[in-house]
């Protein structure tokens, strides 16, 4: 990567795109930091309710402009392809910015950027191939079922995987013909802002008749969720909210949305179980469980944080798993070798430490971890937000630490011997986002997979995704789905048209 494309490591003053103008938001100034060493990397202004009102009003006007509203599906598809190309052209720079924003290892950040580009490419294809329907004739009329964009939609995104989450909301919304106002996590706003810049640049000459796409079609409003997010959800012109984040906030959004009769998609928390059956390939299972809980430093809604292991191989699996956890490379996110970077903040690390203390109080035994790592660089050790991969045993599934989402690198090992009891324990949780199964028996895998109350079940793999496959949770893990061909309809409203074919007048009114 050339020096020109490398993001600056010193603090930058960052402006955002609001209502078609690159400017500061109108709220107070705040800063974001690099979790590796606590250094300030960006200085920007928080958005206010006035910014929300301005962005939404401008988005409503932009979506109705003929240069956007009159685009044919294949022309919107070309626009999305251009966005994908813009992401790929800046892929390394975006990966570095993602790393600085939330401390993920650079190799993982590159994967997230590639995923974002692939998401726009996929929905370009969906946009171009999406079909309305001439429905079967049931009288002297012809009927058509067609879809239209909902209008202006809000996207509220989390701090753990910003660019991927933002793409999964932006791409189908734009493919459907909507305008979008994005509220990124307060502490990780940079990727949403850069996506808006790429979209802004991609819109040049791509509107109907060769005009530019309206600049106000997408706005990014950094700041506090209690201010910006709340105002966005309440705004009468916002016709849908797509939210990824905590369950408590998601329930609040659902309550407000219900008052407006507004559709929402909510991807919320998880306490995902993984199952290691008696016939599992231990090499695959150990590697998969390690990846499922400790990649992203456990800061993932789908982290496999409860691991149920058959008693017949529990001891051997435990030995190999603990050895694998101790061998994980924790350190500088900018190193190609790093597997676990820092946690997002000192506050979040303190919360994880409280959960570990709780687990010990509840009778759990630490097999490894449970502390801040030693031996890192002086700056990272003293100022970075690192925590060791941590494994507990001896905790019942009913323990508080096994019931609540920790959102960190903490795993509970639980032995089992009976399938019926196993399924009961796996499902005995308020969450239902994801689960994993490790077995060589495909029939057994299918039986367990059907019994698990989760939106996604991985079998002999974990934490792999396809943009073509729907994703979402049940119970307190949320509602609605992202990804997949049908998800474009989440941003559309359905309309029915009828054409009368009768040659004679309606006989009802005849004298």
Image (spheres, rainbow, N blue to C red):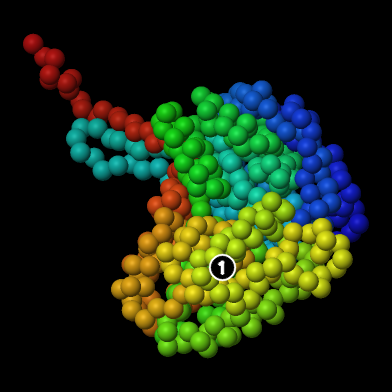
Identify the image quadrant of the N terminus: bottom right
Q: Could you tell me if residue 48 is visible in this image?
A: yes
Q: Residue furthest top?
A: 511
Percent across and percent down for residue 179 are 58, 34
Q: Could you tell me if residue 121 is visible in this image?
A: no
317 and 443: which is toward the camera:
317
Residue drawn at x 52%, y 80% is 285
490 and 174: which is toward the camera:
490
Q: For mark 1, what is the residue?
A: 360
Q: Is residue 251 left or right of residue 209?
A: left
180 and 157: which is toward the camera:
157
Q: Is residue 42 left or right of residue 436?
A: right
Identify the image quadrant of the C terminus: top left
**What secondary structure is marked by label 1?**
helix
106 and 76: which is toward the camera:
106
Q: Quadrant of residue 214?
A: top right
Q: Residue furthest left?
A: 511
Residue drawn at x 54%, y 65% is 361
Q: Quadrant of residue 409?
A: bottom right
Percent across and percent down for residue 458 are 47, 69
Percent across and percent down for residue 164 are 63, 53
Determine crowd level at label 1: few under 14, some 14-19, many 20+ residues with C-alpha closer than 10 A: some
Residue drawn at x 78%, y 37% is 30
């Amino acid at each position: 990567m050339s020096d020109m494309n490398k993001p600056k490591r010193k603090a930058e003053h960052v402006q955002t795109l609001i209502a078609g103008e690159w400017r500061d938001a109108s709220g107070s100034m705040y800063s974001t930091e690099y979790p590796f060493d606590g250094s300030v990397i960006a200085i920007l202004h928080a958005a206010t309710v006035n910014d929300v009102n301005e962005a939404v009003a401008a988005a409503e006007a932009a979506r109705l402009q003929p240069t956007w509203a009159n685009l044919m599906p294949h022309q919107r598809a070309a626009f999305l392809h251009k966005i994908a190309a813009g992401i790929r052209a800046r892929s390394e720079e975006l990966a570095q910015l993602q790393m600085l924003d939330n401390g993920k290892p650079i190799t993982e950040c590159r994967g997230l950027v590639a995923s974002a580009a692939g998401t726009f490419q996929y929905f370009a294809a969906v946009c171009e191939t999406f079909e309305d329907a001439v429905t079967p004739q049931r009288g002297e009329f012809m009927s058509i079922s067609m879809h239209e964009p909902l209008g202006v939609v809000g996207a509220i995104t989390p701090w753990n995987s910003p660019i991927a989450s933002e793409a999964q909301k932006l791409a189908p919304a734009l493919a459907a013909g909507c305008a979008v106002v994005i509220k990124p996590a307060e502490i990780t706003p940079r990727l949403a802002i850069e996506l808006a810049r790429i979209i802004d640049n991609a819109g040049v000459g791509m509107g109907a008749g060769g005009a530019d796409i309206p600049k106000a079609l997408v706005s990014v409003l950094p700041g506090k969720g209690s201010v910006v997010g709340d105002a966005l959800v309440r705004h009468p012109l916002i016709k849908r909210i797509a939210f990824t984040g905590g369950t408590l906030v998601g329930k609040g959004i659902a309550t407000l949305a219900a008052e407006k009769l507004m559709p929402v998609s909510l991807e919320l928390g998880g306490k995902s179980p993984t199952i290691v059956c008696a016939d599992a390939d231990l090499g695959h299972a150990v590697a998969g469980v390690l990846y499922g809980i400790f990649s992203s430093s456990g800061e993932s809604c789908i982290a496999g944080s409860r691991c149920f292991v058959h008693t017949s191989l529990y001891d051997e699996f435990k030995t190999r798993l603990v050895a694998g956890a101790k061998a994980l490379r924790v350190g500088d996110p900018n190193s190609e070798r790093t597997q676990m970077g820092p946690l997002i903040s000192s506050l979040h690390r303190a919360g994880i430490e409280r959960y570990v203390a709780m687990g010990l109080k509840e009778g759990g035994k630490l097999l490894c971890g449970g502390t801040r790592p030693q031996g890192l660089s002086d700056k990272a050790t003293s100022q970075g937000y690192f925590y060791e991969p941590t494994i507990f045993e001896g905790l019942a599934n009913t323990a508080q630490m096994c019931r609540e989402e920790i959102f960190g690198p903490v795993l509970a090992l639980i032995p089992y011997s009976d399938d019926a009891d196993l399924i009961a324990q796996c499902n005995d949780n308020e969450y239902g986002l994801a689960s994993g199964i490790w077995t060589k028996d495909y029939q057994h895998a299918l039986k367990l997979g059907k019994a698990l109350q989760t939106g996604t079940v991985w079998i002999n793999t974990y934490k792999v995704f396809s943009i073509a496959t729907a994703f979402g949770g049940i119970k307190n893990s949320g509602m609605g789905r992202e990804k997949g061909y049908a998800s474009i309809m989440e941003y559309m409203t359905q309309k029915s048209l009828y054409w009368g074919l009768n040659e004679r007048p309606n006989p009802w009114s005849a004298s």
